[in-house]
Image: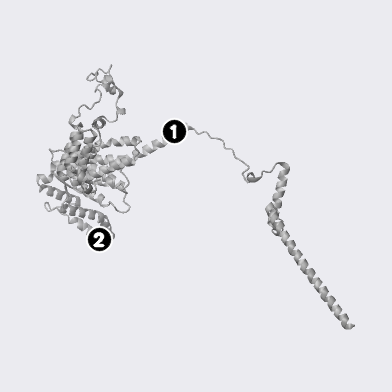
C-alpha cells in the first residue's frame, strides 16, 4: 500500500509538474502572440502617425508632443491653427516702405566725385610736369649729365620693385630737357622712352591703351621729323662695341655707385679720407685743375666730337631699331581693334589713328630709302600695302580727306558754327564785324589743297608693290602680290588681276610657300 501510494503521489506530482510546465508553455506562447500583436499594432500605429511605445520609452518626445498638443489645443481655442507647410512658414511679415531716392542729390554727388577725380588728375599732371624741374637742376645741365641720368634710369629696368610707369615719367622728363641740346642727345632718350612704353604691356594678350599708343606715335613722329629733313642730313646708326662698353660701364657704375659711397663713408675716417682722395684725383690734364666727375665727362664728350668727321657728327648711335618699333606699333593697333567692340564709338574713333600710322610708315620708308636700307624700307612698304589694299577708291578718298581735315582743323563739332554755314564763303575776306561774325571771315574749312596724286590709291599700291618685288623677302613678295591682285579684283579690273596671277605663277607655288600669315 505504501508503495502504491508513493507511486500514485509521484505520478500525481509528475502530472502536476507536467501540467504546470504545459501552463507555462501556453503562457509564453500567449505572451509571444501578444508581443507579435503589439508589434503589429505598433507598426500600424506608426503608419497612422501615433507612436505610443516610443512615447513611453522617451520622456522628452512625450513631453514635446504633449507641449505641442497643448499649444495646438490652446491655439485652437482662439483661432484656427495652420496646417502643413503653412505651419513652418514665417508668420510675421515686415512691410518696407519704398524710399524715394533723390535724383538731384545723387546727380550732385556724382558731379562732385567727377570734379574731385579731375582735380586729382590735374594735380598728378602738374606734379609730373614739375618733376622735370626737380629731377635735374636746369642751371647745370649738360649733354653728358643727361646721358648719365638716362643710363641710370634705364639700368633699373626689369628689377624687382621697379614701377615701369615711374620709370617712363622720368624718361619723359629727360626727353623734355634734352631738346635744347639737339638731336644727338634727344633721339637716344626718345628711343628709351618708346621702349619703356612698350614695357607697360605685361602679357602678350594685353594691348596698348589708346593714349599710350598715341603718345608713342607722337615720339616716333618727332624722330621722323628730325630724320626726314634732308638738308640737315641726320641719320641713325647702331651702337658700336666701344659705345656699348661705355654704356655698360656707366650703367654698372650707376647701379653700384650709391652703395659704394655709403660703404666707404661707413667705415670711419679712413674710408671717408679714401673717398675724398679718389675725388681729388680727377684733375684736368690741360689746365692742371681739379674737376668733378660731370665736368670730366663733358670734357671727354667735347673732345670726342672734335675728332669726328662731319658724317659721323650727323650719325646718332642708339640702342634699338626703328623698323621693329614701327612693326610693334602696327601690331598694337591691330590688336586694339580686335579687342574693342566694333559697335562702340571708341572703335570709330580708333579708326582715325590708321591714317596717322600710315603717315608714320611713309615718313620712315622715305628715310630708309634715303640712307640705303632697302630691306627695312620694303618691310614698311608691305605694312602700308596691308592698310590700303582692302579699301575701295571711293571710300579711301573720303577717309583720307576726313583724316586730313581732322589733322588740320580738329573735331568738327568744335568749329564755330559761323564758319560751317553756307554763307561763310561769300563773306571770306570781309572784315566788317558789325554785320559779319568773325568766325566766318576765314571761310568754310576745306581740304582742297590736298594733292590729287596722294589720293590715287591704285598708283600708290602699284608703286609700293613694285618696290617690294625688288627689295623684299619672299614672304613679303607673296603677301604684296596677293594684296595687289585683290585690289585689282575689288575695282573690277579682271584682266590686270588675271595677268598678274598667271605671270607670278602664285597658284603653282602657294602650297610650298610656307606660312605667309
Residue that label 2 marks: 271
Q: Position of residue 358 (x, y in %)?
A: 23, 38
Q: How is the image coloured?
A: one colour
Q: Is residue 112 above or below residue 61?
A: above
Residue depth check, mark 1 versus mark 2: number of the one nearer the observer: 1
10 Å neighbourhood of mark 2: few (<14), some, or many (≥20)? some
Viewer-proximal residue, 444 or 134?
Answer: 444
Can residue 138 be seen by looking at this rendering? no
Instruction: Name the quadrant of the C terminus.
Output: top left
Q: As drawn, is 159 to the left or to the right of 374?
A: right
Q: Position of residue 327 (x, y in %)?
A: 23, 44
Q: Is residue 453 above or below residue 426?
A: below
Viewer-proximal residue, 40 or 442?
Answer: 40
- Give the structural element (helix, strand or loop) at label 2: helix
- Image point 85% across, 80% down: which residue? 7
- Image point 69% across, 50% down: which residue? 68
Using the numbered discs, state the Cα–Cα distance from disc 1 to disc 2 in whole angstroms. Answer: 64 Å
Q: As drawn, is 62 to the left or to the right of 313?
A: right
- Give the structural element (helix, strand or loop) at label 1: helix
Which numbered circle lies on residue 288?
Answer: none
Instruction: Report which quarter residue 273 is drawn in.
Output: bottom left
Instruction: Name the quadrant of the N terminus.
Output: bottom right
Q: Position of residue 89 (x, y in %)?
A: 62, 44
- Image point 32% across, 37% down: which residue? 347
10 Å neighbourhood of mark 1: few (<14), some, or many (≥20)? few
Q: Are marks 1 and 2 in contact (CB under 8 Å)?
A: no
Q: Position of residue 62 (x, y in %)?
A: 70, 55
Residue that label 1 marks: 108
Disc on the earlier residue, 1 or 2:
1
- Image point 80% across, 69% down: which residue? 23
Viewer-proximal residue, 500 or 212?
Answer: 500
Can residue 13 be seen by looking at this rendering? yes
Amino acid at each position: 500500500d505504501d508503495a502504491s501510494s508513493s507511486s500514485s503521489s509521484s505520478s500525481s506530482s509528475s502530472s502536476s509538474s507536467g501540467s504546470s510546465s504545459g501552463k507555462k508553455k501556453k503562457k509564453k506562447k500567449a505572451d509571444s502572440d501578444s508581443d507579435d500583436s503589439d508589434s503589429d499594432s505598433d507598426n500600424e500605429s506608426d503608419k497612422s502617425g501615433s507612436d505610443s511605445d516610443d512615447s513611453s520609452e522617451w520622456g522628452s518626445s512625450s513631453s514635446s508632443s504633449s507641449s505641442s498638443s497643448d499649444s495646438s489645443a490652446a491655439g485652437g481655442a482662439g483661432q484656427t491653427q495652420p496646417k502643413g507647410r503653412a505651419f513652418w512658414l514665417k508668420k510675421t511679415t515686415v512691410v518696407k516702405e519704398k524710399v524715394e531716392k533723390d535724383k538731384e542729390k545723387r546727380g550732385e554727388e556724382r558731379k562732385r566725385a567727377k570734379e574731385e577725380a579731375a582735380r586729382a588728375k590735374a594735380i598728378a599732371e602738374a606734379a609730373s610736369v614739375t618733376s622735370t624741374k626737380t629731377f635735374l637742376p636746369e642751371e647745370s645741365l649738360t649733354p653728358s649729365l643727361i646721358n648719365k641720368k638716362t643710363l641710370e634710369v634705364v639700368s633699373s629696368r626689369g628689377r624687382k620693385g621697379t614701377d615701369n610707369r615711374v620709370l617712363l615719367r622720368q624718361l619723359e622728363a629727360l626727353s623734355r630737357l634734352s631738346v635744347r641740346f639737339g638731336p644727338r642727345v634727344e633721339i637716344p632718350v626718345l628711343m628709351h622712352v618708346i621702349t619703356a612704353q612698350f614695357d607697360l604691356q605685361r602679357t602678350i594678350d594685353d594691348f596698348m591703351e589708346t593714349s599710350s599708343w598715341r603718345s608713342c606715335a607722337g615720339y616716333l613722329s618727332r624722330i621722323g621729323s628730325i630724320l626726314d629733313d634732308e638738308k640737315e642730313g641726320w641719320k641713325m646708326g647702331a651702337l658700336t662695341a666701344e659705345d656699348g662698353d661705355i654704356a655698360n660701364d656707366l650703367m654698372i657704375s650707376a647701379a653700384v655707385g650709391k652703395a659704394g659711397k655709403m660703404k666707404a663713408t661707413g667705415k670711419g675716417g679712413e674710408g671717408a679720407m679714401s673717398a675724398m682722395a679718389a675725388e681729388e684725383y680727377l684733375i684736368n690734364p690741360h689746365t692742371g685743375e681739379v674737376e668733378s666727375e660731370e665736368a670730366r665727362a663733358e670734357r671727354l664728350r667735347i673732345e670726342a666730337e672734335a675728332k669726328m668727321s662731319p658724317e659721323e657728327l650727323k650719325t646718332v648711335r642708339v640702342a634699338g631699331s626703328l623698323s621693329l618699333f614701327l612693326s610693334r606699333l602696327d601690331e598694337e593697333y591691330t590688336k586694339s581693334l580686335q579687342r574693342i567692340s566694333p559697335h562702340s564709338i571708341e572703335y570709330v574713333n580708333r579708326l582715325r589713328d590708321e591714317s596717322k600710322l600710315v603717315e608714320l610708315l611713309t615718313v620712315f620708308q622715305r628715310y630708309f630709302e634715303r640712307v640705303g636700307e632697302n630691306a627695312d624700307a620694303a618691310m614698311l612698304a608691305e605694312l602700308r600695302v596691308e592698310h590700303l589694299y582692302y579699301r575701295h577708291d571711293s571710300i579711301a578718298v573720303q577717309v583720307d580727306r576726313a583724316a586730313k581735315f581732322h589733322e588740320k582743323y580738329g573735331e568738327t563739332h568744335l568749329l564755330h558754327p559761323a564758319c560751317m554755314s553756307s554763307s561763310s564763303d561769300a563773306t571770306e575776306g570781309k572784315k566788317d564785324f558789325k554785320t559779319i561774325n568773325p568766325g566766318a571771315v576765314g571761310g568754310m574749312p576745306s581740304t582742297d589743297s590736298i594733292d590729287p596724286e596722294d589720293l590715287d590709291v591704285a598708283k600708290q599700291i602699284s608703286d609700293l608693290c613694285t618696290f617690294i618685288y625688288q627689295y623684299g623677302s619672299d614672304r613679303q613678295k607673296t603677301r604684296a602680290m596677293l594684296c595687289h591682285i585683290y585690289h585689282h579684283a575689288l575695282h573690277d579690273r579682271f584682266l590686270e588681276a588675271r595677268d598678274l596671277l598667271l605671270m607670278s605663277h602664285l597658284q603653282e607655288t602657294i602650297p610650298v610657300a610656307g606660312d605667309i600669315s
